[in-house]
Image: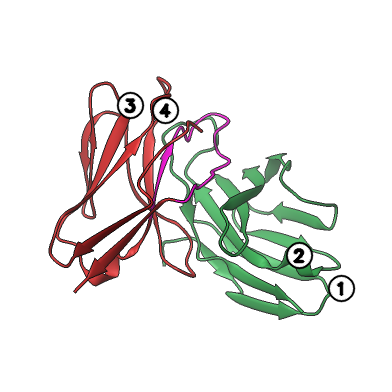
Chain colours: A red, B green
Amino acid sequence: LAKTTQPISMDSYEGQEVNITCSHNNIATNDYITWYQQFPSQGPRFIIQGYKTKVTNEVASLFIPADRKSSTLSLPRVSLSDTAVYYCLVGVGLNDYKLSFGAGTTVTVRA
Amino acid sequence: GAGVSQSPSNKVTEKGKDVELRCDPISGHTALYWYRQRLGQGLEFLIYFQGNSAPDKSGLPSDRFSAERTGESVSTLTIQRTQQEDSAVYLCASSLTGAAANNQPQHFGDGTRLSIL
């Protein structure tokens, strides 16, 4: 897995948009970018995955610039239930199936 | 449901006893993975199944740990003669295809919280 760097924590308020940027300068050509969410006492939950440009699903959007050395997870109109730890992973393909989650970004949403 | 299901959700047992943890992957997922997560720590890879075969058992910490998968579906992780350091959350994940595919995310269950007294 390529090394990633993301902020340790972010605070927000209900209804706001939260953007978490992950740096991955050593991303390889075949690497995909994957984001997970984890609540206390639960397993990691897959949020979104992308390779380039923009990906959007019912939960989030993922923005990836042309050089792919970073990516931004965008959570629209967060609610209290979005308070969780968010992990950015790069390179989940061949021989990279041994997922390793770093500290992630703890997002705290306040009323 | 359609997600990965693990049972039991919690298990408390005495040191020296054997325990068996079960994982039901998402239907149709050929790859299955077991991880261990100690309190406040990251994921620790244990074993990977492709179908019913385990091409990578490198993460199993000792010979007290074993796992099997049958019918390309259910998997069980067995820990024999449990010790206190085995206390952790054991997570199972599955993906549609195996490690050779670089865009198949792993989907996790909520884990079994194992406590050894």
Q: Which mark is residue B16?
A: 1
Q: Which mark is residue A69?
A: 3
Which chain hosts label 2? B
**Helix, strand or loop for disc 2:** helix
Q: How far across and how far down the image is residue B105, in percent?
A: 43, 43
Q: Label 3 amino acid?
A: Lys
A110 within the magenta span: no
How crowded pointer 3 is (Cα within 10 Å; few <14, some 14-19, many 20+) is rated as: some
A92 within the magenta span: yes
Q: Tell me the mark number nearer the camera, choosing from 4 and 2.
A: 2
Say which label, 4 or 3, has the lower sequence index: 4
Q: In terms of secondary structure, what is the magenta stretch mainly?
A: loop
Stretch of the chain drawn in magenta: A86-103
How crowded pointer 2 is (Cα within 10 Å; few <14, some 14-19, many 20+) is rated as: few
**Residue contact at pointers 1 and 4, CB within 8 angstroms:** no
Q: Tell me the mark number nearer the camera, choosing from 4 and 3.
A: 3
Which chain hosts label 1? B
Pick whichever, B88 or A108, lies toward us.
Answer: A108
Q: Tell me the mark number nearer the camera, choosing from 2 and 1.
A: 2
**Residue contact at pointers 4 and 3, CB within 8 angstroms:** no
Q: Label 1 amino acid?
A: Gly
What residue lies at 86% left-to-right and 68% top-to-bottom?
Answer: B81
Q: How far across and how far down the image is residue B64, in percent?
A: 84, 58
Seen in the picture, residue B1 relative to A92 is either above or below; the reply is below
Q: Which mark is residue A31?
A: 4
Which chain hosts label 3? A
Looking at the rendered structure, whether the residues under marks 3 and 2 are on a common chain is answered as no
Q: How far across and how far down the image is residue A75, in percent?
A: 21, 53
How crowded pointer 4 is (Cα within 10 Å; few <14, some 14-19, many 20+) is rated as: many
- In what quadrant of the picture does the C terminus of chain B appear? bottom right
